[in-house]
Amino acid sequence: MPKMKAAVFVEPGRIVLEDKPIPDIGPNDVLMRVKTTTICGTDIHILKGEYPVARGLTVGHEPVGVIEKLGSAVIGFKEGQRVIAGAITPSGHSAACLCGCLSQDGAGTKHGFKAIGGWKFGNTIDGCQAEYLRVPDAMANLALVPDNLTDEQVLMCPDIMSTGFSGAESGSVRIGDTVAVFAQGPIGLCATAGAKLSGATTIIAVDSVPNRLEMAKKLGASHVVDFRAVNPVEEIMRLTDGRGVDVAIEALGTQSTFESALRVLRPGGTLSSLGVYSTDLTIPLAAFGAGLADLKIVTTLCPGGKERMRRLMEVIASGRVDLTSMVTHRFKLDDIEAAYDLFGHQRDGVLKVAIAA
């Protein structure tokens, strides 16, 4: 049986490169030859054992590649075409999909979690940190990459860009809004860019890493707040003359950032949560107005599917946002264990790594 190289979860603390069989595909699937992928913060949660997956699973959920083989029922595509698939791969016909919630396709089917949804790559099926990837329900999930865009230009679309933009979308950011974005990692930076595109006129980016704060300015932040230098809640309230923000986007997944996001909302404001939390959250009574402050808390799982990918690539092609500078390091698939070591320990100013198969 033909083999391929793949990054495999072995046990907490160990993701290693192994040889695995090249996936078989069914009639509705496509076999993608992966050209470029990356490591996500969620992969680090998997590595640390904070999010459980099956031992032996191939990890990764941000694929850019070429169609190697078409399933017998797949139409509208040709072998050799450049494509991406979202990290979320909805079937299009589940109860969640038919309710219009594509990201939650299949929710509640694994480990007792109710919100894993359509996130299958590197979660419930083998992922894309490998030479080949089986893309399920390909006609709902594959999107052709325009000839005028490079692989690296679209590398953020499958997850980071889609997730970050959804923070602004789910928060219903409007023209003239004031928005605070807590954490300027890859998702937070995309949330900053998404808030700008959605019409926010004042965007306050919170982090402590100088190069991330500088990049936030380039992507649309009006103000940057170093939480190590000042109390971010007090500083945001000062910047807004005590009014608070219309929308606060939480992009890290910790109690402290969630609570800070809640505390800076104006009356009737919205907390848009994107973080992946590994412990229970506590909602402070005063910040929540004892449940009477007309506040909204919304959560979002990365929107996926073919149409979402097309729209994101249209944004990139328009020149309205350029995320290529988020790739700070590049590795070959053969060196993915070293890439995990660098990314997991956040050394050398790493933001995103590109992995070339």
Image (tube, grey):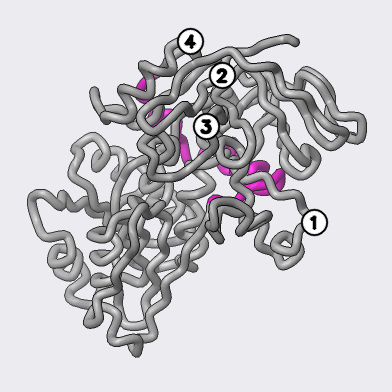
Q: Quadrant of residue 66?
A: top right
Q: CA distance from mark 2 to mark 4?
A: 9 Å
Q: Which of the two discs, 3 and 4, labels the residue nearer the N terminus?
A: 3
Q: Secondary structure at mark 2?
A: strand
Q: Going 63% across and 50% down the picture, which residue do you hit?
A: 118
Identify the secondary structure beneath mark 3. Answer: loop
Residue that numbered label 4 is attached to:
334
Q: CA distance from mark 1 to mark 4?
A: 38 Å
Residue at image location 33% in from the left, 66% down from the top = 178
Between 246 and 129, the one lying in front of the other is 129
Looking at marks 1 and 3 on the same chain, the residue that comes earlier in the sequence is marked by 3
What label does residue 6 carry, if any? 2
Q: Quadrant of residue 16?
A: top left
Q: Is residue 197 visible?
A: yes
Disc 1 and disc 4 in contact, CB within 8 angstroms: no
Instruction: Give the residue number, with chain letter if any, for mark 3.
Output: 55
Image-based side of 157 in relation to 346, left or right? right
Q: Is residue 167 above or below residue 292?
A: above
| Above or below, 60 relative to 315 | above
Label 2 or label 4, whichever lies nearer to me, is 2
Residue beneath the point at 27% across and 60% down: 255
Say which of 22 and 138 sits in front. Answer: 22
Which residue, given by chain and number where applicable, does mark 1 sit on? 93
First along the sequence among labels 1 and 4: 1
Name the amino acid, label 1: His
Q: Quadrant of the C terminus?
A: top right
Q: For mark 1, give the secondary structure.
A: loop
Which x, y percent locates residue 254?
29, 55
Residue 182 position by quadrant: bottom left
> Of label 2 and label 1, which has the lower sequence position?
2
Estimate how packed mark 3 is, as few (under 14), some (14 to 19) or many (20 or more) residues with alpha carbons within 10 Å: few
